[in-house]
Amino acid sequence: MPRYRPAADVLRAEIDGEEVLLNTRTGSYHLINATGRSVLLALEEGLTLDETVQALAAEQSEPAERITADVESFVEAMCARGLLEVNE
């Protein structure tokens, strides 16, 4: 299973539990809510997608099956926007 990391061209700042990301290649800003920030931080720590889902499920007291699709969709969108990349 691939691991992900923030793209090298992305600048980040935490603001009130959320995170603002700037893709310096495109000049686009993105605001990520607290849940998205938790996912991003887990991936940055080296967790796989499955491990990230498990961690988020425990943090939010939700079944992993309930949030798997949301986490996968979030990661796909972040990759498509050049904010995350596969850590090889």
Image: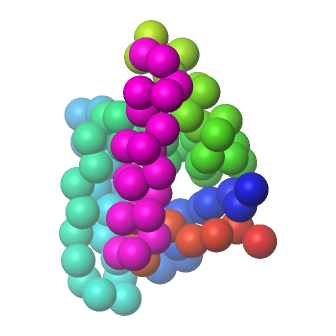
Between 9 and 59, the one lying in front of the other is: 59
Where does the image place residue 65, in percent across and percent down from the top left?
49, 28
Quadrant of the rendered structure where residue 50 is? top right
Where does the image place residue 37, in percent across and percent down from the top left?
40, 42
Judge left or right: residue 27 versus residue 47: left
Looking at the image, what colour scheme do you see?
rainbow
Judge left or right: residue 34 versus residue 49: left
Whether residue 56 is visible = no
Please tell me which residue is depicted at 41% across the width and 27% down the height of the picture: 66
- Residue located farthest toward the top when viewing the structure as drawn: 61
Quadrant of the rendered structure where residue 25 is? bottom left
Give yes or no for residue 61 being in the magenta stretch: no
Give yes or no for residue 76 being in the magenta stretch: yes
Judge left or right: residue 81 versus residue 38: left
- Residue located farthest toward the front when viewing the structure as drawn: 65
Whether residue 6 is visible = yes
Where does the image place residue 81, in percent across and percent down from the top left?
35, 75
Give the dominant element type of the magenta stretch: helix, strand or loop. helix
Q: Which quadrant holds the C terminus? A: bottom right
Where does the image place residue 52, in percent across and percent down from the top left?
59, 37
Q: Which quadrant holds the N terminus? A: bottom right
Does residue 52 lie above or below 48 as drawn?
above
Between 18 and 79, the one lying in front of the other is: 79
Please tell me which residue is depicted at 60% across the width and 61% down the height of the picture: 5
The range drawn in magenta is 62-81
